[in-house]
Amino acid sequence: MSNTITIPKRPSREFVSEILEIDSWKKIEPLFSDLVNRKIESVLELEKWMLDRSELEAVLEEDMAWRYIKMNIDTTDKDLSERFHFWIKEISPKMAPYSHRLNIKLVENKFLNELDTDKYKIYLRGVKKSIEIFREENIPLFTKMEAKQQEYGSISAKMSIEVDGKKLTMQKASQLLKDTNRKKREKIFNKISERRLEDRDILDTLYDELISLRQQIARNAGFENYRDYMFSALGRFDYTATDCYSFHDAIQEEIVPIVTSFEKERKDKLGFSNYKAWDTSVDVDGNDALKPFNGGDVLTDRTIECFRKLRPYFGECLATMKEMEYLDLESKDGKAPGGFMYPLYEIGVPFIYMNAVGSQRDVVTMVHEGGHAVHSFLSRDLKLTEFKSTPSEVAELASMSMELLSMKNWDIFYDNKEELKRAKQEQLEKVLEGLPWIAAIDKFQHWIYTTDHTAEERRKQWLEISSQLGNQIIDWSGQEESLVNQWQKQLHLYEVPFYYIEYGMAQLGAIAMWREYILKGEDALDNYMQALKLGYTKSISEIYETAGIKFDFSVEYVKELAEFIKDQLSKLER
């Protein structure tokens, strides 16, 4: 990595004003009108029109992104919230019909067939699908839905508990579940659960409202339910709802028994006759929780070094973000929960947002979001904004692969070899342990949007799914309400519906990618980078193939990859 960081500059604009300030619709409507009314007399003019549209999209998406990021960093600042909601209420609804008209103008243009088919095929099929599902009457419903979705973050950000006279965020409090004092863990678990249960009815009502809005959007677009609508809206051309059910079954058949064996071994080592929910995170050998870093700056610097040792370019990406202050990593009061990498399509440098508290889980989150960031850098020079907007099955392959690839250099976080071994073992176990939860959340969503139900029936269905895909060893007696309320912790259900199974599919891909790296070394990293450079100019299957792996979630493939992880775990034990 070079000693001097070159800070990327925003490209010169050719269509949008360099000094555009978006404080009213009037400022941007003329740009849309220009695109709608412009005459296109050649294929070159068509491509110039597409580039101008792409530039406008990048400008608008980046402006909205900053509003979202800043609002999440401080949910108590009303001005930041109002700036974001201004966009949702005043800009997005007015953009939607213009975007639809531009899509139609594109597909009906007489020079369309002269475009490079290979270059634009994926983009154009997405445009055509957008035209199919667009309905004018859904615009105000989207506005209402987007505002409602943000309520979840505000409600969650206010949750905290008091421990020893100190107010702790839920993220910080959850760290205490690793404490070696069992009585303390039980007390903390119950405090967290009781605090979540305080908002159970509020979150149930919010979810009911969101379901109703989403189902109406689907019906307006001619779909039987929101699940089917979202498969079109998300552009799921490579698999079907039936394939998702096959994924659920494969995880239940092949992964749940392995995870159950992990948990049974934990229970036996701990020596508890009743293994409780507050026993799932503590170290079985009585060691204190891993502390790989202290503070966001240390996390940043160590991750940069970890990435640099894997590939200098990877470290350069994060170092650039550090220099530009495109990182906000530490948990604090008023900050919305979760973590994300937000692409900024005009400048081409993404932003990473986290709620770090000094845990090993934070290291995993950071290298995960760092993988997304590397992906964003690798695809930043693609011509169209839409080329850079990859489907989640590809985006999560980039990030989840980085979790495993980076393990080679986790000694940067741990001087102690035993702690390093613990961190790697925990990571490999969680790679498999996460799959049943992903399958459970996805299966739950399929049921939610294909079945009329009440909040009470929803709770019963969650219990049914948990009995199939949940932890089979935990004794929930006395904490039944916590079990039935588990699903409310999952932000995706509220804010980004049906965006979750992608994590499972990409996790399988990440295991395969790591296996390639172990077998082929630098050649595998070359393939990984080449795949990410494609953005969304190829199908999901083609991108996976470029990476040297398969887009496959059959029982046989799931079993093969699970056996590989088990083998790697056994090598750690030697």
Image (cartoon, rainbow, N blue to C red):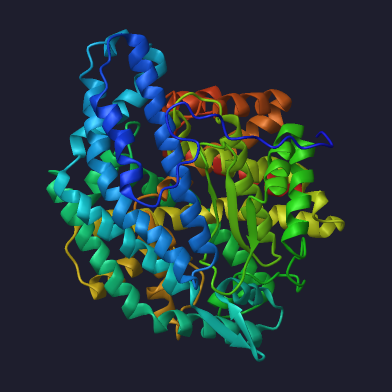
Can see residue 451? yes
Looking at the image, which residue is at 80% across and 60% down? 419
Residue 384: horizontal and vertical position, in percent? 44, 26
Drawn side of residue 415 relative to residue 555, left or right:
right
Q: Residue at x 14, y 49 (%)?
A: 137
Quarter of the picture containing the N terminus is: top right
Task: Give the mark count.
Answer: 0
Tell me: residue 220, above or below residue 461. above
Say above or below: 290 vs 195. Answer: above
Farthest bottom residue in view:
165
Residue drawn at x 58%, y 75% is: 333
* Position in image of residue 360 (x %, y %): 69, 60
The answer to which of 128 and 311 lies nearer the viewer is 128
Q: Quadrant of residue 175?
A: bottom right
* Residue at point 74%, 49% (across, down): 303
Q: Is residue 448 above or below residue 332?
A: above
Q: Is residue 390 visible in this depiction of the protein?
A: no
Instruction: Answer above or below: position of 70 versus 26.
Output: below
Front residue (pair 112, 468): 112
- The quarter of the displayed image where residue 30 is located: top left
Front-lying residue, 473 or 412: 412
Q: Position of residue 532 (x, y in %)?
A: 56, 30
Q: What x and y, as percent, mark residue 118?
A: 40, 14
Corner quadrant of residue 433: bottom right
Near-viewer residue (185 or 252) = 185
